[in-house]
Image: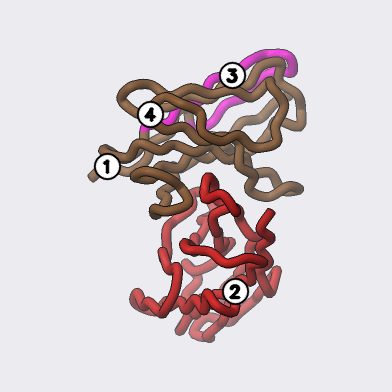
């Protein structure tokens, strides 16, 4: 089945810094989502981005489907950005999502 | 529009007992998926329902089962609970299918088995 990798596994930043999170996937996909899991466990939708670039405030994402990767950019990070960031893609049959292992981000004040 | 809701939010059960978790999808969404999240295994797919039919199932033992009602609400059941079933159980809904539509997650049910 499709494999999803994320890097780095852990990231510690000072408030105000910028960061780039990467998601690699092993097969072509027609759907990709980025999520932020808050400390209470809720998965918050960040981007639905099968290809191209999207921006939402301090966050933006780019997916290059032909090269099988996606990037999530966080600018001017805040302590509330802390948590785990997941990317997810459909399995080979499009019947469920396969999640990456996540990047744990800690933003220090 | 109301989001995905899950009940209960927290649950403590004893080994050998059974448990039922409930999920109400976003209005109009017909696909409901369930995931288990544990520190060791990450987020793993359990099953997906559409129009009261299970369309896809992950690699979990038969103790894990589910169903979907005509209003798209879904329940999952775990029988003969084991310590390893302690996890966060997340439900997600999408319009038609997780592979082609954006998925939205509920807040989760945190199950502790003692």
Examine the rendered structure and indicate whether residue B71 appears above or below residue B94: above
What is the distance, in whole Å, between disc 2 and disc 4 at their CAs? 33 Å
User: Disc 1 is attached to a residue of which chain?
Assistant: B
Tell me the red chain: A
Question: What secondary structure is found at the residue carrying circle 1?
Answer: loop
Question: What secondary structure is found at the residue carrying circle 2?
Answer: loop
Q: Which residue is mark 1?
A: B2
Of mark 3 and mark 4, the one earlier in the sequence is 3
What is the distance, in whole Å, between disc 1 and disc 3 at their CAs? 26 Å
Question: What secondary structure is found at the residue carrying circle 4?
Answer: loop
Q: Which residue is mark 2?
A: A68
Q: Colour of chain B?
A: brown
Instruction: Choose mark 3 or mark 4, whichever is in front.
Output: 4
Q: In the image, which disc is placed on residue B19? A: 3
Stretch in magenta = B9-24
Determine if marks 2 and 4 fall on one subunit: no
Q: Residues within 10 Å of mark 2 (few under 14, many from 20)?
A: some
Q: Residue at x 26, y 39 (%)?
A: B28
Determine if marks 2 and 3 fall on one subunit: no
What is the distance, in whole Å, between disc 3 and disc 4 at their CAs? 23 Å
């Amino acid at each position: 089945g499709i494999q999803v990798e994320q890097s780095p596994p852990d990231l510690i930043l000072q408030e105000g810094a910028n960061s780039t999170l990467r998601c690699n996937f092993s097969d072509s996909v027609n759907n990709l989502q980025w999520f932020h899991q808050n400390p209470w466990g809720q998965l918050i939708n960040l981007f639905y981005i099968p290809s191209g670039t999207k921006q939402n405030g301090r966050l933006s994402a780019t997916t290059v489907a032909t090269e099988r990767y996606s990037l999530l950019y966080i600018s001017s990070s805040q302590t509330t950005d802390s948590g785990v960031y997941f990317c997810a893609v459909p399995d080979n049959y499009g019947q469920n999502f396969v999640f990456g292992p996540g990047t744990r981000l800690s933003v220090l004040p | 529009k109301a989001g995905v809701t899950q009940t209960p939010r927290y649950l403590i059960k004893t080994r050998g007992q059974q448990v039922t978790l409930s999920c109400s999808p976003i209005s109009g969404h017909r696909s409901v998926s369930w995931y288990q999240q544990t520190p060791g295994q990450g987020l793993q797919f359990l099953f997906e329902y559409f129009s009261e039919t299970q369309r896809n199932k992950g690699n979990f033992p038969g103790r894990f089962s589910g169903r979907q009602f005509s209003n798209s609400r879904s329940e999952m059941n775990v029988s003969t609970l084991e310590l390893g079933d302690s996890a966060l159980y997340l439900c997600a809904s999408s319009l038609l299918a997780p592979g082609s539509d954006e998925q939205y997650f509920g807040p989760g049910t945190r199950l502790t088995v003692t």
